[in-house]
Image (tube, rainbow, N blue to C red):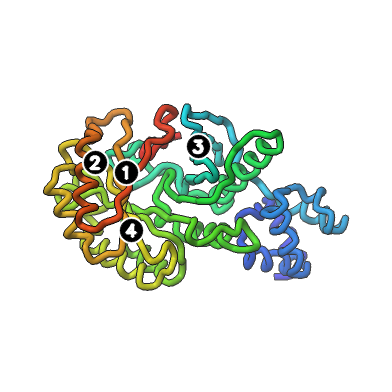
Amino acid sequence: MCKKNILSNIKKKKINLLNFNLKKMINFFIKIGEKKFRAIQITDWIYKKQNIKFDQMSNLNFFLKKKLNNIAVIKIPKCIKKIKSIDGTIKWKFLCNKEFIETIYIPEKKRATLCISSQVGCQLKCNFCATGQLGYKRNLLVSEIIGQIWYVINKIKKYNSKKKNFPPIKNIVMMGMGEPLLNLKNIIIAIDIILGNYGFNFSKNKVTLSTSGIVPAINKIAGKIDISLAVSLHASNNTIRNKIMPINKIYNIQLLLESIKNYLKKSSANKGIVTIEYVMLSKINDFQHHAIELSNLLKNIPCKINLIPWNPIKNSSYICSSSKNIINFANFLRKKGFIVIIRKNRGSDIQAACGQLIA
């Protein structure tokens, strides 16, 4: 296809350059008759200088600016609401092509974690999770995934320029709305941008993908994506997991654990350790015999265990395990040699805690 036809096709709908990693950006500029170094200039403006207006990109000539304004755009999802928790957690609500998603900024003293979404809703229907109740609507585009990070980084810099003390984002966790591995194509591109030195340049140890256990996808990314992996296990046996996580009827615990081992063999992120997430549900999965089962399941897997006190959601009969039961559960696992963390409750007063995102 000649350059003229490419340009005429592009003009019909402007291309959002935020959907491109560096490789795709280079291909785009070559197709429109420009040198590949222009792609490097553009990504530098987007991610390093945090500027998305072509007319303000001083190292682009007049004619290139005009061309880009005609055929391309750098479009960030529109933020329509910001809510701040009493503990400092911030929830941003974004409008993405008539659908809503949520992104959570979780500050500590010197650093912050950003929890991003990968889908509008979720098709996995975990019945202890508000997003699962919402149902699945669609996958997010790369620009919608990356745009969450870009927007919040930009906002934090602006806040701090006004002498407000917001710690910088040091960790990215894909634990928001949706199952990342069911949006694999776009997630792979987004991760390239998040890790790439042309992009956000995060360390692979500071980026975590959380999955409910899409076994073929875990096996597929093994050796291709090297970031920290977190797995939502939430049960010590298949009987319980079948009830609370329907995905287990397709990929059971044994298949899931084998895929985790396969991933860890090919990963050096997070010192080759997987994070096992386990929501604490009263009288469902929090008895001592569940802790015994869990320790037996995980004894040959390098892992740390993240115990998550269940956060209340509408239309659910679940009850969070008591603090005593959670501590006893954790202590039993620690005696078995496991690293165990009890997750802090952050943002629950604004429906921003784990399992509460529903937009």
> Is label 1 in a helix, a strand or a loop?
strand
**Residue 214, image x, y percentages:** 33, 58
141 sits left or right of 256 in the view: right
- Cα separation, mark 3 vs mark 1, equals 30 Å
- Cα separation, mark 3 vs mark 4, equals 24 Å
- The residue mark sitting in front, 2 or 4, is 2
- The residue mark sitting in front, 3 or 1, is 1
- Cα separation, mark 2 vs mark 1, equals 8 Å
- Cα separation, mark 4 vs mark 1, equals 25 Å
Q: Marks 3 and 4: CB-CB under 8 Å?
A: no
Q: Residue at x 47, y 60 (%)?
A: 205
Q: Residue at x 15, y 54 (%)?
A: 293
Q: Which mark is residue 342?
A: 1
- Cα separation, mark 2 vs mark 4, equals 30 Å
Number of on-image labels: 4
For marks 3 and 1 on the same chain, the one whose residue lies earlier in the sequence: 3
**Residue 174, image x, y percentages:** 45, 50
Q: Marks 2 and 1: CB-CB under 8 Å?
A: yes
For marks 3 and 4 on the same chain, the one whose residue lies earlier in the sequence: 3
- The residue mark sitting in front, 4 or 1, is 1
Residue 84 visible in the current orientation = yes
